[in-house]
Each structure stands twice: as C-alpha cells, then as structure tokens.
Image: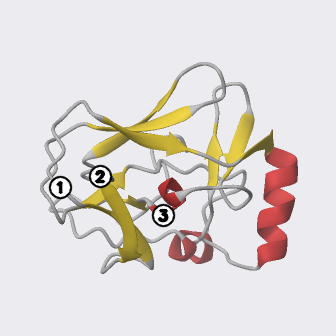
Amino acid sequence: MRRVTVRKSSVHGRGVFALRAIPVGQRIFEYRGEVTSWRQASARHRRSGRPGHTFIFGLADGRVIDGSVGGNGARWLNHSCRPNCEAVEDGRARVFIETIRNVKAGDELFIAYGLTVGEAITPELAADYVCRCGAKRCTGSMLDLTSG
C-alpha cells in the first residue's frame, strides 16, 4: 500500500504528501537518481536554466545523486525549517527519507535542505533560494547559512 503521493504544493511547485498516518522513525523511500560528480550534475543544472531549483543531493563521498536523471517522487520533497523527515545516507551512495516526527494523513513531507553553494551569497543568489515554509522560526533561506 502506497504511503505517499506527489501533487501540487502550496509551499513550492510539487510536494510529497502522506496518504495515511506515518509514525516517527519510518523509512518512507529512497532518494533515487543518477550517482555522478558534482561537476557533471552542476553543468547539467546550469543548462536547465532553473536557478534555485535543483534535484542534486550531495553524498558524503563528494559525489551526488542527480534526481533529474532516473529520479523518483522523492525529488519533489520540499524544504522546511521545521522538517518532519530527514535524509539518511547508508554509506553505499544511497539516501533514504525517514520520518523524524509523526506525520498525519494529508500532511506534506519536508526535509531541511541545508544547501551550500560554491560562491559568495549575494542578495540575488539568496533570492533564488528563498524559503517559503512558513515555519514559526523560518530562516528565510534553503541555504545552510551556518557554513559561511
């Protein structure tokens, strides 16, 4: 029985929603896509012409999973400053999405992106990565502002 579906999100574009209640500590699905280098995925992303919109998921070994190639519904997870899920890497270049809080049927699933960019964060760049989560303590950005 399917636990999630992808549909229009009020936060941003598409989102992933629970079809039924999912308790804390449950593995929902794997983040799938082509495992490749940052260089190749970044070049592909630049060619797409969609700043601030990425399906690139960084791995501990320096490679990435590019959900734009062979990806699944996990690529539609939106960011929140108060997520109900987290991404867990298993050490074999696989990332799984697991709940960190109880999720009710109909809730949108979120992870905290913590995005990093290899350049100075200008007002223009920050605008590309503005957060729309609406959390009480929203940082206003999908970027990891602590790593600067």
Mark number displayed over residue 20: 1
| Separation (CA) of disc 1 from disc 2 | 6 Å
Marks counted in the figure total: 3
Estimate the x, y position of residue 69 in percent, counting from the top left: 74, 58
Residue 90 sits in quarter: top right
Q: Is 128 left, or right, of 140 in this rendering? A: right
User: What residue is shown at x 12% (from left), y 55% (from top)?
Assistant: 104
Closer to us: 55 or 81: 55
Residue at the image position 45 percent from the left and 59 percent from the top: 142
Residue 76 numbered tag: 3
- Disc 2 or 3, which lies upstream in sequence? 2
Query: Which residue position holds label 2?
Result: 3
Callout 2: helix, strand or loop?
loop
Q: Is residue 80 visible?
A: no
Q: Position of residue 55 (x, y in %)?
A: 62, 59
Disc 1 residue type (three-letter): Arg
